[in-house]
């Protein structure tokens, strides 16, 4: 871990001291922003940890907790909304067994994130599963995709 | 020997519909068919960017000696027949070719920016140069002074395409006048408005036009360093932009001593981190500096004190993309399109309940009716048009009776909406206007940066009032309260986000007051959307007892024996609508 932190810190120094970029690179490396990383940066760079925390909580993209192995992104843009994304998302939550306010399943297999707009409005509603865009999504089709991912996960753990 | 060109539409829409696989299958099929090497060499296959009509993806153009046939909804398994019958046999597969409405969709448009977007390979700089790319850069750097460039842009009447419509030439002039250095130039590609995706399409389809616009802008204001601030939600656009920058550097259009003229310009990409408010210029600059993206009061304007407190010009993707075309064809050419105060063409994202959803480029001033019916093909399922929402969360809803107005900065403002970044969402009789207003307020409430009280608390209170109205708990006085509070938020908020956030509320109250009243007085949602005001029942005459609803019901509220009418236990029903969706016999009734 420490080696990676050091590497990212040297990028930071080349990068006009950009905290947003440092945190983006941290998340890229670890999947989320570990608390330990923030305190390490704070100590080494002589910048208060609150500055990092302030940035990390301001932007929707940053995660302070580990995320699931499979990332499902549901678009909540206007075109998706008027085409019924609400119901799609509710069904998806049920399929994954997520309670209100939860975004990651307990087995850390899935994370469901909702974003404002992915800009694929002409094929609304849109669900992105592990970076693959599913346009004109229906609950049935998405449920099938999830089942496949669930079964591939059980196979792997056997 | 025949000259064959195959274009496969590979924007985000095309790729999602299977564009990558279609292109691969074309390549494989053509190499497997035992065709002569010479024939295969004459088959050029390209990926192209978005041409607008993503609803019909995957779109494929097959040109043989200049004769083009466009195919729609192409899947990999259809490729073999096209290769055999059309490419080898010479007879197009007529039943897969695009229909009449594809041509109608394109015929009323005036394509300037989108023309090259759907026909060149976005990952190949030579493809852009072949259609006149970087000629404007050469012309500017070798024959024009910065003042000449600014004069051309001013004369063209180009106004910012990001939303506010600020005159671009004037902005450049103000920045150039400031004696402080260095000066910066920024491209705002943080297309945050939900429902807008023209900037993504331009970057995915023709990234070099944006770079060229920035190089010319940099020369005009005397800047040597530029930034593209782009959303991380657009991975394909980011990737193509990176490639484009690397290619432009290699070809000598970017970097030090551009084209041997001694002019230096370096460009850097900054990824956004998911904050709508960063579309606001002062907030965006804070974000590039690595801080929380919070707006500051102006003046000083960013042309004097912008990024790192230095003079900065910030323009939107579409604005920059227009610049090389204006330089090449002249200010008069650009100004010949549009209205007196809104010049040129504008790209709109036409989505929602519309037959031909996609990107359209039209001259400013064209009527909404022409866009919706002539280009868009009318409302999906031929339902009744209710309203058009323009300008995203900062815009408003324009009712059906006003759709003959022209689409330009002034006319839309007059009816309580804005051009904004160009999102245009068509709403039909099944959309509840109170719900739409609530949707936007939920968005702005979440995206308010929290710095100023009117926006932070005002949008939250507006949202709460709307929420109780859609739940059937609205009070008679709520409409007045919504209006008063809206005006306060507009007047007192620090930046554009708060100043425009109440627009969706005000415009829906203005044009759809009776719909609000139905929710408040009759506890009824006329469009049957607000679930707290709905009851689902099964019409026993129609129910065949197939059990589809019973299996779909997540709360086990439906009971019934096989082949006998089922019933919904109202106390268990969570009103999710799953039964309504799955019933093939229209036996589930909602009211």
Image (cartoon, coloured by chain):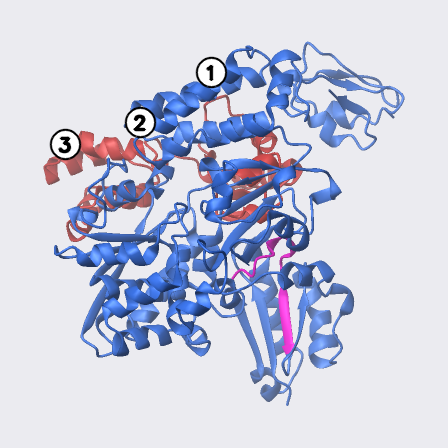
Tell me the chain of label 1.
Answer: B
Q: Which chain is red?
A: A
Looking at marks 1 and 2 on the same chain, the residue that comes earlier in the sequence is marked by 2
Residue B64 in which image quadrant? bottom right
Give the residue number, with chain letter if any, for mark 2: B450
Image quarter (top left, top right, bottom left or bottom right) of the C terminus of chain B: top right
Outermost residue toward the front in this view? B340
In front: label 1 or label 2: 1
Q: Are marks 2 and 3 on the same chain?
A: no
Please give left or right for residue B83 compared with residue B148 in the image. Answer: right
Query: How far is the residue under mark 2 from the one under mark 3?
Result: 21 Å
Q: Are marks 1 and 2 on the same chain?
A: yes
> Chain B's colour?
blue
Indicate whether B211 appears above or below B262. above
Give the residue number, with chain letter if any, for mark 1: B481
Q: Residue at x 64, y 90 (%)?
A: B1
Q: Is residue A134 visible in the rendered structure shown here?
A: no
Q: Secondary structure at mark 3?
A: loop
Give the residue number, with chain letter if any, for mark 3: A48
Q: Are marks 3 and 1 on the same chain?
A: no
Q: Residue at x 56, y 61 (%)?
A: B51
Region of the chain picked out in magenta, as a range: B49-63
């Amino acid at each position: 871990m420490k080696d990676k932190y050091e590497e990212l810190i040297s990028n930071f120094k080349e990068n006009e001291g950009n905290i947003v970029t440092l945190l983006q690179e941290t998340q890229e490396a670890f999947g989320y922003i570990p608390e330990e990383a923030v305190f390490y940066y704070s100590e080494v760079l002589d910048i208060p940890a609150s500055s990092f925390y302030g940035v990390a909580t301001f932007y929707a993209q940053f995660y302070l907790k580990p995320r699931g192995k499979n990332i499902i992104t549901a678009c909540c843009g206007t075109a998706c909304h008027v085409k019924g994304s609400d119901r799609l998302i509710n069904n998806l939550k049920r399929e994954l067994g997520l309670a209100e306010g939860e975004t990651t399943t307990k087995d850390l297999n899935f994370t469901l994130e909702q974003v404002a707009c992915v800009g694929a409005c002409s094929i609304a509603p849109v669900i992105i599963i592990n970076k693959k865009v599913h346009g004109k999504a229906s609950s049935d089709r998405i449920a099938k995709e999830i089942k496949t991912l669930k079964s591939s996960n059980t196979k792997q753990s056997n | 020997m025949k000259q064959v060109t195959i274009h496969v539409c590979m924007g985000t829409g095309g790729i999602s519909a299977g564009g990558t696989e279609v292109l691969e299958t074309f390549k494989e099929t053509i190499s497997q068919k035992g065709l002569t090497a010479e024939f295969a060499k004459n088959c050029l296959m390209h990926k192209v960017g978005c041409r607008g009509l993503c609803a019909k993806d995957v779109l494929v153009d097959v040109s043989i000696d200049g004769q083009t046939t466009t195919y729609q909804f192409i899947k990999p398994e259809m490729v073999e027949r096209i290769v055999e019958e059309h490419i080898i046999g010479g007879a197009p597969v007529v039943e897969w070719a695009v229909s009449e409405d594809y041509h109608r969709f394109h015929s009323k448009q005036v394509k300037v920016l989108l023309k090259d977007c759907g026909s060149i390979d976005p990952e190949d700089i030579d493809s852009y140069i072949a259609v006149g790319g970087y000629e404007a850069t050469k012309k500017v750097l070798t024959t024009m002074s910065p003042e000449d460039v600014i004069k051309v842009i001013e004369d063209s009447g180009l106004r910012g395409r990001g939303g506010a419509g600020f005159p671009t030439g004037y902005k450049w002039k103000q920045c150039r006048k400031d004696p402080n250095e260095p000066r910066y130039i920024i491209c705002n590609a943080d297309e945050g408005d939900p429902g807008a995706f023209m900037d993504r399409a331009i970057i995915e389809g023709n990234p070099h036009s944006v770079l060229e616009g920035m190089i010319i802008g940099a020369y005009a204001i005397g800047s040597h360093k530029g930034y593209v601030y782009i959303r991380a939600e657009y991975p394909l656009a980011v990737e193509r932009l990176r490639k484009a920058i690397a290619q432009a550097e290699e070809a000598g259009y970017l970097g030090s001593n551009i084209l041997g003229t001694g002019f230096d310009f370096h460009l850097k990409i900054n990824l956004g981190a998911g904050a709508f408010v960063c579309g606001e210029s002062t907030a965006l600059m804070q974000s590039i500096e690595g801080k929380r993206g919070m707006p500051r009061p102006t003046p000083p304007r960013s042309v004097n004190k912008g990024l790192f407190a230095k003079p900065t010009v910030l323009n939107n993707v579409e604005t920059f993309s227009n610049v090389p075309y204006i330089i090449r064809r002249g200010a008069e050419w650009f100004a010949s399109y549009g209205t007196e105060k809104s010049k040129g063409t504008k790209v709109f994202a036409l989505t929602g309940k519309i037959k031909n959803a996609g990107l359209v480029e039209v001259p400013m001033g064209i009527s909404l009716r022409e866009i919706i019916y002539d280009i868009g093909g009318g409302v999906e399922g031929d339902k009744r048009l209710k309203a058009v929402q323009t300008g995203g969360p900062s815009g408003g809803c324009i009712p059906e009776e006003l759709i003959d107005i022209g689409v330009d900065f002034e006319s839309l403002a007059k009816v309580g909406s804005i051009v904004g970044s160009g999102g245009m969402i068509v709403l039909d009789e099944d959309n509840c206007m109170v719900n739409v207003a609530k949707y936007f307020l939920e968005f702005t409430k979440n995206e308010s940066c929290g710095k100023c009280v009117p926006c932070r608390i005002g949008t939250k209170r507006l949202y709460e009032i709307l929420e109780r109205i859609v739940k059937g708990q609205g009070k008679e006085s709520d409409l007045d309260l919504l209006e008063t509070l809206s005006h306060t938020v507009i007047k007192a908020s620090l930046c554009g986000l708060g100043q425009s956030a109440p627009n969706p509320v005000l415009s829906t109250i203005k044009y759809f007051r009776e719909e609000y009243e139905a929710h408040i007085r009759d506890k009824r949602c006329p469009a049957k959307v607000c679930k707290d005001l709905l009851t689902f029942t099964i019409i026993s005459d129609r129910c065949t007892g197939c059990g589809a609803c019973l299996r779909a019901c997540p709360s086990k509220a439906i009971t019934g024996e096989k082949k006998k009418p089922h019933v919904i236990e109202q106390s268990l029903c969570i009103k999710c609508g799953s039964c309504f969706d799955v019933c093939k016999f229209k036996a589930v009734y909602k009211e």
